[in-house]
Image (cartoon, helix red, strand yellow):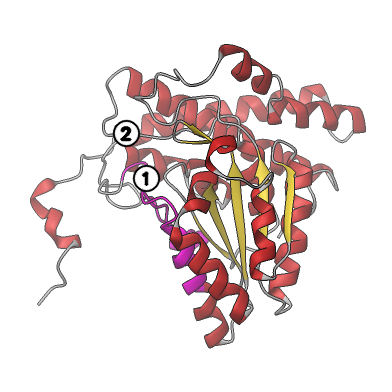
């Protein structure tokens, strides 16, 4: 667990570097797919960087997360190695899952990332189960569970939240409400004004915050983490944010207006944080530019190194399916 993003210059640098790393990683991935150098599919979270960064900064290194199909930011926020992530997406043997998982299935147990999940709401029961395991083993650990707004209409969400509430498990449910479940607006898919309102049905706190404000996200998560660690049970944190890109690489964005996208791009969480840092005097323009440059150079190095790694060998693909005799 680190200090709040604007508590110290060190914390500010960490938060800004994390957000720029997420942005540059996803821009690189977007470019590689467009050039036909990366295959499969991917889901970008450009515009949502404050959510992943703020949540993960409120966790300790030994705490865990579960992620989603839109999970690059969560993985980076929890401390993943950029080169191994890029290698995974490029189907290289040096990737986190030896090139077998791709964009939607990166796991990094060493940093507490229990795995991204291509199934909508699939990570929610896993997070609840992990929290139960920590409780049964007497471990002082918390799980932060990321999911999108569409996942809250799945049965797995309601069952897992209910169970976590009954048993007061150390889990924080983090809904990244980016306004659209694939192409369907949340205004048409649910009757409640805020997704966090659903927490009342399970007798747990629910809080809705500005998901483009990294400090607000951190504070809400920190409160929820402290509550979970104290044995008081889960909290539902709703981060209101927006993805600039389509649902996936094949999305033509026909369901959104250019005006809507432009309005949200004007609320860029990274530029907003930079403005706050300069206004507060925590970081200078020169220091901020240095962080931008560092993130870009690290990403270029990750792409070069990952590209030069050996391709995953399909001949031993079944080694990860069947246990050795």
State the residue at coordinates (27%, 45%).
Answer: 99
Which is nearer the N-term, disc 2 or disc 1?
Answer: 2
Residue furthest toward the right? 280
Camera sees residue 240? yes
| Name of the residue lying farthest toward the front | 191
Task: Say whether residue 165 is left or right of residue 304.
Answer: right
> Which label was assigned to residue 225?
none
Report helix, strand or loop for mark 1: loop
Q: Are marks 2 and 1 in contact (CB under 8 Å)?
A: yes
Find the magenta span and give its range: 102-130
Q: Secondary structure at mark 2?
A: loop
Task: Please determine whether, in this image, residue 249 is positioned above or below residue 170.
Answer: above
Q: Position of residue 220 (x, y in %)?
A: 76, 54
The numbered dot on residue 41 is 2
Q: Looking at the image, which is closer to me, 81 or 103? A: 103
Residue drawn where x is 83% and y is 32% of the image: 277
Q: Nearer the viewer, residue 152 or 319?
A: 152
C-alpha gap between disc 2 and disc 1: 8 Å
On the image, the x and y values in percent for residue 128 come to: 51, 70
| Residue 185 position by quadrant | top right
Residue 266: x %, y % from top left? 70, 19
Q: Is residue 223 magenta?
A: no
Q: Is residue 179 visible?
A: no
Nearer to the camera, 29 or 9: 29
Please give the name of the residue rendered at 90% of the width and 28% of the height, measured from the top-left corner.
279
Q: Which residue is mark 1?
A: 104
The total of numbered circles placed on residues is 2
Residue at x 42% of width, y 24% of height? 30
| Quadrant of image for the C terminus | bottom left
Q: What quarter of the picture does the N terminus occupy? A: bottom right
């Amino acid at each position: 667990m680190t200090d709040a993003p604007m508590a110290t210059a060190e914390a500010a640098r960490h938060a800004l570097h994390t957000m720029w790393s997420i942005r540059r990683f996803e821009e690189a991935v977007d470019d590689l797919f467009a050039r036909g150098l990366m295959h499969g599919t991917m889901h970008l979270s450009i515009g949502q960087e404050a959510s992943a960064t703020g949540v993960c900064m409120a966790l300790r290194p030994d705490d865990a997360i579960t992620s989603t199909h839109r999970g690059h930011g969560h993985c980076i926020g929890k401390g993943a190695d950029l080169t191994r992530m890029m290698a995974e997406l490029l189907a290289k043997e040096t990737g986190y899952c030896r090139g077998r998982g791709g964009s939607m299935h990166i796991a990094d147990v060493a940093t507490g990332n229990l795995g991204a999940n291509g199934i909508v709401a699939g990570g929610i029961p896993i997070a609840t189960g992990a929290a139960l395991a920590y409780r049964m083993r007497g471990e002082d650990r918390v799980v932060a569970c990321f999911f999108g707004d569409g996942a809250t209409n799945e049965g797995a969400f309601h069952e897992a939240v209910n169970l976590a509430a009954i048993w007061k498990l150390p889990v924080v449910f983090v809904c990244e409400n980016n306004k659209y479940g694939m192409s369907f607006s949340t205004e048409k898919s649910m009757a409640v004004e805020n997704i966090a309102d659903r927490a009342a049905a399970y007798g747990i706190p629910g809080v809705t915050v500005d998901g483009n404000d990294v400090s607000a996200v951190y504070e809400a998560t920190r409160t929820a983490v402290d509550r979970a660690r104290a044995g008081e049970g889960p909290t539902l944190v709703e981060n209101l944010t927006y993805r600039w890109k389509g649902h996936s690489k094949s999305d033509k964005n026909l369901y959104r207006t250019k005006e809507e996208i432009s309005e949200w791009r004007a609320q860029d969480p990274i530029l907003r944080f930079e403005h706050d840092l300069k206004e507060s005097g925590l970081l200078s323009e020169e220091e901020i530019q240095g962080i931008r440059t560092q993130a870009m150079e690290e990403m270029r190095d990750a792409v070069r190194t990952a590209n030069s790694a050996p391709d995953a060998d399909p001949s031993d693909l079944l080694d990860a399916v069947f246990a050795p005799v």
